[in-house]
Amino acid sequence: MSDTPRMEGWWQASDGKWYPPEQHPNYQPLPPTQSQRPPPSPTQTTSFEPLRQEDGRFKRGWRKFRGLPTWAQVAAWIVLGVIVIAAASGGSKDKARTAAADLPVTTFRPVPTIDAALPTLPPATSPPVTTRATSAPTTAPPTTPAPATTLAGPKTTFGPGTYRVGVDIAPGTYVAPGGTGCYWERQSVFGGGFDAIIANEASSGGQVVVTVSASDKGFKTSGCGTWRPG
């Protein structure tokens, strides 16, 4: 420590004092020169650390390498490792070829063939096939169609009731025995009321005759017995 720098390389701290370079926080000692380095011993092993040469060109290159980004330094180390592994594997292959060439050659003699007569096996027999007799299909007897039902037309003989003219009874002249309480009426509207009556009659006895027209819609009768064509 001094108030003034004594030689080149001294640095000034925040307290205003001057200190030698080896006391700087970022100080890195220089590698020993060739004259200061002890001669290598025969048993000295080679390490994988970067070799440092004393010439200025190698030092500048090493500083540039250390100044590269971390990913670039990692990539360089990976490439170097691949080269070393490839060189080592090449030597292993050469050693394997040499070891294979030194192996003794084994010769195999053919085994004699024995012509022994094989036993004759009886021919295989298949099981008997059972067939089932199939009966002829049964034919159903022909069915006789039912006779067509003929719808009866309008009746010409009828008793008490209300009938549709042309549907239930045919138009025409009819005769009934009559009797006490015999009543009939012709209608312009089937099942209509008093306004639908075309003609009517209430008989207390004796034969009754009435002509039903084709234009009539209904005919009503009660207490007159059976009506027949007259």
Image: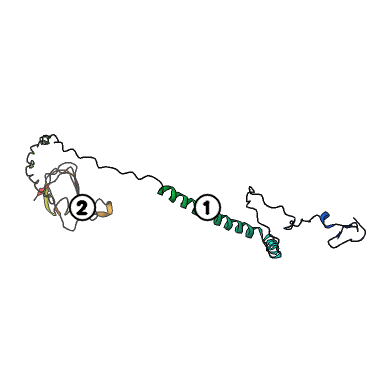
Residue 183: x and y, percent? 19, 46
Give the Cα separation between the discs numbered 1 and 2: 128 Å
Q: Nearer the viewer, mark 1 or mark 2?
A: 1
Residue 37: x and y, percent? 72, 54
Q: Is residue 215 left or right of residue 21?
A: left
- The extreme bottom residue here reads 57
Q: Residue at x 57, y 55 (%)?
A: 81
Marking on residue 218: 2
Quadrant of the image occupied by residue 195: bottom left
Relative depth, front residue between 138 and 44 = 44
Q: Is residue 125 left or right of residue 186?
A: left
- Mark 2: secondary structure: strand
Where is mark 1, residue-wise?
88
- Image quadrant holding the N terminus, namely bottom right
Quadrant of the image occupied by residue 60: bottom right
- Mark 1: secondary structure: helix
**Disc with the residue nearer the chain's start (1 vs 2):** 1
**How many marks can you see?**
2
Marking on residue 14: none
Q: Is residue 52 left or right of residue 146?
A: right
Relative depth, front residue between 143 and 4 = 4
Instruction: Give amino acid for label 1.
Output: Ala
Relative depth, front residue between 45 and 167 = 45
